Amino acid sequence: MQRSSSMSWMQQDSRRPSTYVEMVNDIINQLEKDLEAERSTTAALNQQLKELQLKSKSQNDELTAAKSELVSAKVAHQRDLERIQMLHAVEVEELIKRHEQHLQSAILNNERTISAIRTQSQEAVIPASVDVNASLPDFLAFIDRFQEETVKLTQLQKSYISG
């Protein structure tokens, strides 16, 4: 709204200086224009502020949802990790039990093998009675037979141990 001079019937001469009222009217007119520009700037800034607030709220909601998702993923990961550790512990225990069973079985098999070897060696080595009146060739033949049987038993024992 522009103010006009109270003396509108008078035309201002370009050569004469402006009156106080005209100067004040010009200042008021300029201030009103500036005020209107500030109002439109304020309205635009308020609109931008509302848009930024909405965007900030939606981003905050998205961040909250992402945080919640991360927390639930962390909890699920922790549960999976604990389950895997428990399964691993059970598997290790089973392997230890199987190993102990294999050891016991191997010990029993070794004892059976040793017992069988002893039985065979006792059956194979039945010393023949030595005739005191026998001749020297008979005695040497007895020693040769004894050495051969000893070699056979040693080989038999090695084959049981290695086999």
Image: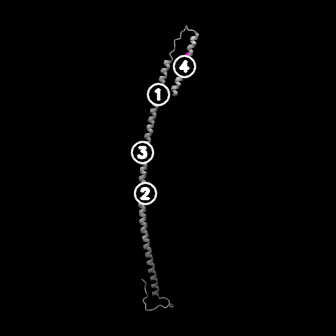
Spatial distance from mark 4 to mark 2, Cα to Cα? 83 Å
Q: Position of residue 14 (x, y in %)?
A: 50, 90
Nearer the observer: mark 2 or 1; the answer is 1
Q: Within 10 Å of the Cα at label 4, are there few (<14), some (14-19), or many (20+) other Cα atoms? A: some
Upstream in the sequence, badge 1 or badge 3? Answer: 3
- Dot 1: within a 10 Å radius of its alpha carbon, few (fewer than 14), some, or many (20 or more) residues? few
Q: Which mark is residue 101?
A: none
What percent of the width, then of the height, locates residue 91? Answer: 44, 40
Would you call the spot at circle 3 few (<14 residues within 10 Å), some (14-19), or many (20 or more)? few
Q: Mark 1 = which residue?
A: 109
Q: Measure the C-alpha gap from mark 3 to mark 2.
A: 25 Å
Mark 2 or mark 3, which is nearer the start of the sequence?
A: 2
Q: Determine crowd level at label 2: few under 14, some 14-19, many 20+ residues with C-alpha closer than 10 A.
A: few
Residue of label 4: 150
User: Which amino acid type corresponds to the residue marked 4 in the rendered image?
Assistant: Thr
Percent x, y of residue 62? 42, 60
Return the mark for residue 83.
3
* Dot 4: element: helix
Where does the image place residue 63, in percent across and percent down from the top left? 43, 59
Q: Residue at x 58, y 11 (%)?
A: 137
The amino acid type, in three-letter code, at marker 1 is: Asn
Asked if 86 appears above or below 63 in the picture, the reply is: above
How far apart in space, not on screen, are marks 1 and 3 (Cα)?
38 Å
Q: Is residue 89 left or right of residue 156?
A: left
